[in-house]
Amino acid sequence: MSYVELSYWIPLLPALGFVLLILFGRSLPGRSSGWIATAVMAVAAVLALGLLRDVILAAPGWNLAALLGGNHGEALAKAGSPDFPFRLEWTWLAIRGEAGIPLVIYIDALAAVVTAMVALASLFIHLFSIGYMHGEERYSTFFAYLQLFSAAMLAFVLAGNFFHSLLAWEVMGLMSYLLIGFLYKKKTAQQAQKKAFITTKLADLGFMLGLFWLYLLIGNFDLADLASEQTLAMIGTGAAAAVGLLVFVAAMGKSAQFPLHVWLLDAMEGPTPVSAMIHAATMVAAGVYLTGRFYPLLIHGEVLWVVAWVGAITALFAAVLAPAFADVKKILAWSTVSQLGYMFLGLGVFGWAAAMFHLLAHAFFKALLFLGSGSMIHGAKTQDIFEMDRLKKYMPWTYWTFLIGALALMGIPPFAGFWSKDLILHAAEEHARFLWLVGLVAAFFTAFYTTRMIVIAFHKPRTASPWKAAAWTQGAPWLNLGPDEAEPDPSPPEGHHPHESGAEMITALVALAVLSLLVGFWGSPLFGYGLLTLVYWGEAPELLPAAKLMGGYVTGTLVALAGAGLAVYWYAADPLRQRAPLWLTQALQRRLYLDEFYYRVLGALAQAPTYALELFDRYVVDGLVDLVGYLSLVASSFLRHLQSGRFAVYALYMLLGALALYVGGVR
Amino acid sequence: MVTLGHFLLLSGLLMAIGLYGVLTRRNLIAVLMSVEILLNAAALAFASVAAFRDPSLFAGQVFALFIIVVAAAELSIGFAILLNVYRTHGAVTDDAISEMRG
């Protein structure tokens, strides 16, 4: 039994775990449901790692020197095994000899790597949640949701058939709704879950339209088919562009790309492990993964520049907004949006492998940062970085792991984000110089807001938060939230000292920190580009010689250090001095009024036909119904006089009736 | 020469008298009596047609007999109702029981 044959258990196990926990979770004592879910995930992670090992053994090997010399013809050192990429197939939906839609598991290098990534990240998030969610209501339900979410993501990654990708994609959408609104008693959580679901659902329409259009064009949903020459020849350039863009819209929704990024910030209303799950390793990554899978169409349709621009705009936009926020999770939310923008930028400038590398690296360090923020919130009893009191002193484990994640995010060598982000910037420099500059500016801001967060939360003593007046905590009337409904985060009680979190949480943090440290080396030139020669696009990996990369690496590091230095210079001395004009801060905290624009303009546009229909209903439909009633009233006002109560009169009617029948000719 | 026409004329007259009584009398006893006249008019018509047209078939006579039986039953029920009306309303006119008017 090879791991490939067992691969269908990877998504199946968490799905079974979900069934078990949702049915019997309530009767399980204490934290056992959390441990069961974690154990299930651990088995899945072992299977996923075994699968990755099998795939690495079966994948073709490359001669690095020849690749770097640009001599691709002689670079193949070891041919891949004949049945690679692996493919498992079952009949599904086959009716009376019709082929139906086969259930395909398609395992190439990318699928194996992402599966391992999702399984590992999900495992540590599960582990962390055991401690973090302790004492919450619906403890076992939470783990059931996490299980199904992981199952959906794993199924999505392994699906060799876009129809099943779509199914898993939609399950993820539903689970994100349930998880973001897990604390459903909070009004803000209800609003957030609706916002996330509706925004992504709107984008999903693009996936469906694109998919069905594709089916009309090529007559199946097969993933491997999409990359073949005949298929692409069958699809015209225009249709390829249209389908590719439609699917990209769905990816924009799930991956929170501008202008569909609005749901992600609000999604921070969910419990912190959910943020780590959805916004680091799974759902947002699904959009990047899907775009990567539809790459042949995007190239064929020549619309990659759209992807690149959307990514670059998002990367910069989110990174600029982040410094205006004081809620640690919201800063990380913007950071996620920004990093996803980098991935799309990478995809758009032919840096396919770099984007996937960044996806992998970001999953680990962002999960780490989110879990770290969960630990901070847990210990400090507040989400506001200004109210956190010298956490470095009280929470050393959290501090050091968080610092590793933050350095990876900033792109300081040798941490994961450094290798992957600079590869993306490099690809941008090759293909789109302007976007490369945009990426660099975003990198500067990334380092700036990350450092600001660390300095204020971990090093500075507690102060009154200057941004309690932020739009969100003061209630956001344009979101139907009055000040009384939007609950500001409770400030910690006076004299409350932060404390370090429990063992499960620390273990998860340390494990993710180790991964954040190591995973970058897998794709770095120091260690022979292991990841990039495994996961690549096209016939052979495209590698740049280290000498050529050096300039980019130095530039990226300097930019990151500059951003960090500015933050230290500004905030280490006096964190509370007003740094930006008030109108600017307000505008940034209100997300440049984009949400308000959506709410007012699009909301009004959506409501206008509703209003017309309401009038139609009220006056025409109701009018008709009322008319019937009114007619019977009028008729009865005449007819009531016929009922005199005197049977002699009734007898006369009978007689008249009989006469009428007689005259009318009823024989 | 008495023909079928004479009998039917008599029957028709009886029918008209009965109808007039039913439609005009206010006293319920009188109304019941008028109904009896109506029924007798019908019975007479049946019997006479049967006797003149085809005496060998007894359909007409049987029908007349039926009408007599039904009239008896109807009267007994009618008088039972009347007694109750008298008990509750203290009168047997149709005004007394016109509470169900619209």
Image (cartoon, helix red, strand yellow):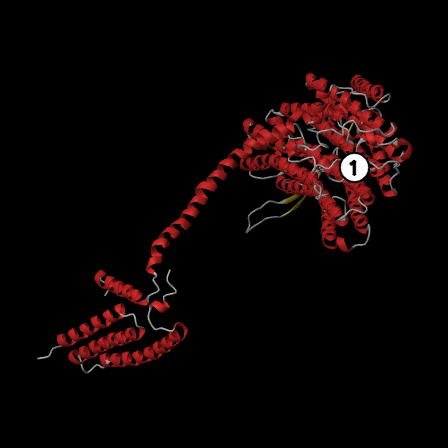
- In this rendering, the answer to whether A257 lies above or below B49 is above
Horizontal side of residue A633 vs A430, given as left or right:
left
Which residue is nearer to you in this view: A454 or A388? A388
Q: Nearer the viewer, residue B39 or A437?
A: B39
Which image quarter is the C terminus of chain A in?
bottom left
Looking at the rendered structure, the kind of residue marked 1 is Pro
Residue pushed farthest bottom? B56
Residue that badge 1 annotates: A490
Which of the 4 image quarters holds residue A663? bottom left
> Does any portion of residue A232 appear in the rendered image?
no
Quarter-wise, where is residue A559 in the image? top right
Residue under the image location 62 percent in, 26 percent down: A299
Rendered location of residue A662, percent (x, y): 22, 64
The residue nearer to you, when weighing B86 against A435, is B86
Q: Determine the chain carrying the residue at label 1.
A: A
- Residue A75: percent from the left, percent from the top? 75, 26
